[in-house]
Image (cartoon, helix red, strand yellow):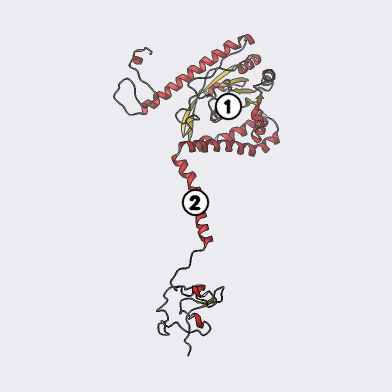
Amino acid sequence: MVPRVLGREMMCPAKCTILERGCAIRPTSLCMGQLLPWTSPERPHTALLIHRLHLPCSWCPCSPPQLWGRRLSSPASPHPSGMMDVTLLHGLLLLLLLPVLLFRHSATFRYFCKVTFFNIWILTMATFISPFAAIRGRCVENMKLLCAAIRPLKHLYGIKIEVLGAENLNLKEPYVIVCNHQASLDLMGMVEVIPKRCVPIAKKELLYMGTVGWACWLSGIIFIDRRRTGDAIDVISQTAKTIQRENLRVWIFPEGTRNQSRSMLPFKRGAFHLAVQAQVPIFPVVISPYWDFFSSKEKKFTPGMFTIRVLPRIETRGLSPKDVPELTETVRNIMVDVFSEMSANHCRDQCAELPLLPRTGATKGTDCTWHEEDANGTND
């Protein structure tokens, strides 16, 4: 009598019988269903206790004779495609973890990530608000959309902004605002204090920056070609008439370019020619340095705080174009003094946060140097 074979039969590609949880069948009598010599009907699982047994094709009589001697317990070789899938998975996980590790441990990598995000945010918001601004057309009221798009950045970067003297800008008449220019972060400060019906003056290259230039143009921003002095003078003259006719305010960075040094660059005279031609007052605005949390040279960009001070108005009524050079220097000197004062206050605040050390002439490890002579009112 042929004993009953336990388990479910399966067929390999070579048509060899394979059993699950049961007895192995002698390769030479696959069709007979005989048990192997070392098994019996009473102990069908004595030889094979594994959950699933796949007999290799080397046991098949159709296979080459040199492969018949392989043991049942020899594991099958792993599939090459499976190993490749595991390798690709490990590589993908590494690529996902690498930016996270770099962001946590590399200040330079964090700097470039934050600057890139800043630019992507501006581009995305400009693309989003441009269709809505286009419905109204080129209008100064669209500046509200730009400001609303930029304001969330201070929360995303953890930057706190303190504004002093904002009440000075509560005038219904037109005027010109001049402000120092340190970095792209000035945009976050500008939208905090910019009054209603105020448009900045920007370089003409900004106009060709895709949707950003389109959104700026729709918001009424005035563009000047700095390489063509004649065209810039014409724009200033037209703007002087426009701000009187439409009761506009104009925001200008008189340094002309970004500057992160300890002082201010020489001022361009365009803003002061504009104020004199339109006979409108000038409001200097000074933004404190970003040294403690932002530096493009040191590749540093961390949460921090800066202060904006709006200084009292400077009248231009009765002045003529020949007074512009003196007016320019006067305003610059005022702003430089305030900037130096804010820098000194910032330096003292940093020194106050340090633990007290024995005074040996200067406190090492800081940019703030304490001299005994300073307490007596003398300078170095």
Query: Taking 123 as reference, is 48 left or right?
Result: left
Res. 184 in view: yes
- Earlier in the chain: of badge 1 and badge 2, it is 2
Mark 1: few/some/many CA within 10 Å (<14, 14-19, 20+): many
Comparing 312 with 296, the one in front is 296
Rendered image quadrant of residue 231 = top right
Query: What amino acid does circle 1 point to?
Result: Ile
Residue 95, percent from left and from top: 51, 48
Amino acid at pointer 2 = Leu
On residue 194, the disc is: 1
Q: CA distance from mark 1 to mark 2?
A: 46 Å
**Residue at x 39%, y 27% (from the top left corner):** 350
Expressed as whole percent of the image width and height from the top left, the position of residue 240 reads: 67, 18
Q: How many numbered circles are shown?
A: 2
Q: Element under label 2?
A: helix
Q: Residue placed at 34% from the left, 15% from the top? A: 375
For this orientation, the residue located farthest to the bottom is 1
Q: On residue 93, which mark appears? A: 2
For residue 71, what is the image quadrant?
bottom left
